[in-house]
Amino acid sequence: MFVMKKKVSVIGAGNVGATTAQLIVQSGLADVMLFDVVEGMPQGKDLDLAEACPLWNSSTIIRGTNRYEDTADSDLIVVTAGLARKPGMSRSDLLHANADILRGVCNAIAKTSPHAVIIIVTNPMDVMAQLAWKTTEFSCKKVMGMGGILDASRLAAFLAWEMNVSPEDIEALVLGGHGDDMVPLPRFTTVKGIPLTELFSKRKIDSLIERTRNGGAEIVAFLKSGSAYYAPAASTFQMVRSILLDEKRMLPCTAYLNGEYGIKDIYVGVPVILGKEGVERIVEVKLTKEEKSQFKKSCESVRKLVKNLGI
Ligand code: NAI
């Protein structure tokens, strides 16, 4: 049977955008249009990636561009355009500058790719996802954000090092906003099915959670300019794959809550089923009183930023 390749546009050809493009092209999953406002930069990266395709045995097409027309009729759009954190900055320090960028990007993609699914990566990501949904006026199922997969992967990595086990045997779950109040859930983080709460003392668990919450800042402090991008791109790629291949994976992503978890009218991180329609279902897990209050606190931090933007 003849299957047409899907078209993915990556808006923002910086560290996260170009690395996400690399993973898509290398896997042969879809053709990629790499967009940036900086002239020449996406074209240079496109050539470099295209010249690697013979080595990856990939027949996908990658193009770099500064024109939105070239991204037209994308099936999926990944938005990484914007400023990244510098040492000492929190994700929310980027709010207004990145909101201006996001509005422009979303107005353009709503016109040129009206049927696309959109994954927002730009920080502060939960609020940017909400802004993208409002600006494009797409169905909330089609607009989502990447954060929980990355936070869970960081927790899984720290746990694997701590126990000296393969990360393959670890499943981690982090809910809430992708910010300092994120809610890593030890009860639902398991090593071959054994919950973290059975394996470690509360003190040890607290220190793993703390390192997870600071995972992004820890890398920013080393890099000095720029922030993490290998794990963020790998996390975004998991979402891209689940949507394009209609895998229906259950992944922690930022989605619009309309009463689920007792929260209304904000985008925040929860487990969702990701398939060809986008966020096909939100999965509600029963939280303890303490988990609920942490989740609520995290939602309030996101809501504050949403109000600050006036959306
Ligand atoms: P970067 O600085 O390497 O790349 C950003 C790119 O956006 C630059 O190439 C820049 O020219 C481009 N850009 C700026 N304005 C634009 C516009 N109007 N249209 C199109 N492109 C535009 O930054 P990096 O490291 O790739 O990070 C990108 C964003 O992703 C940042 O906001 C960062 O905080 C966020 N991020 C989010 C993560 C998450 O878990 N959600 C994880 C890592 C980064």
Image: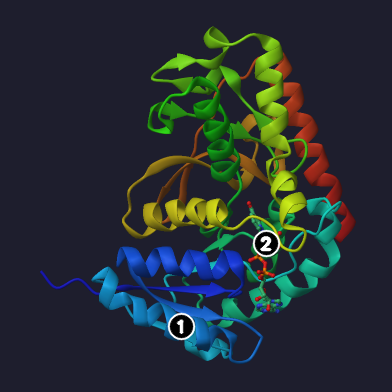
Q: Quadrant of the N terminus?
A: bottom left
Q: Residue at x 45, y 56 (%)?
A: 237
Q: Amino acid at mark 1?
A: Asp
Residue 261 in the image: above or below residue 17: above
Place of residue 27 in the rendered image (x, y in percent of width and height, measured from the top left): 32, 63
Which quadrant of the view contains residue 287? top right
How many numbered circles are shown?
Answer: 2
- Asked if residue 310 shows in the view, the reply is no
Residue 305 in the image: above or below residue 34: above
Q: Is mark 1 within 8 Å of ligand 1?
A: no
Q: Which residue is mark 1?
A: 46
Place of residue 159 in the rendered image (x, y in percent of width and height, measured from the top left): 54, 26
Q: Is mark 2 within 8 Å of ligand 1?
A: yes
Q: CA distance from mark 2 to mark 1?
A: 21 Å
Q: Secondary structure at mark 2?
A: loop
Which quadrant of the view contains residue 100? bottom right
Which label sits in the foreground, 2 or 1?
A: 1
- Left or right of 24: which side holds 290? right
Q: Secondary structure at mark 1?
A: helix
Q: Amino acid at mark 2?
A: Thr
Please give the label number shown on residue 122.
Answer: 2
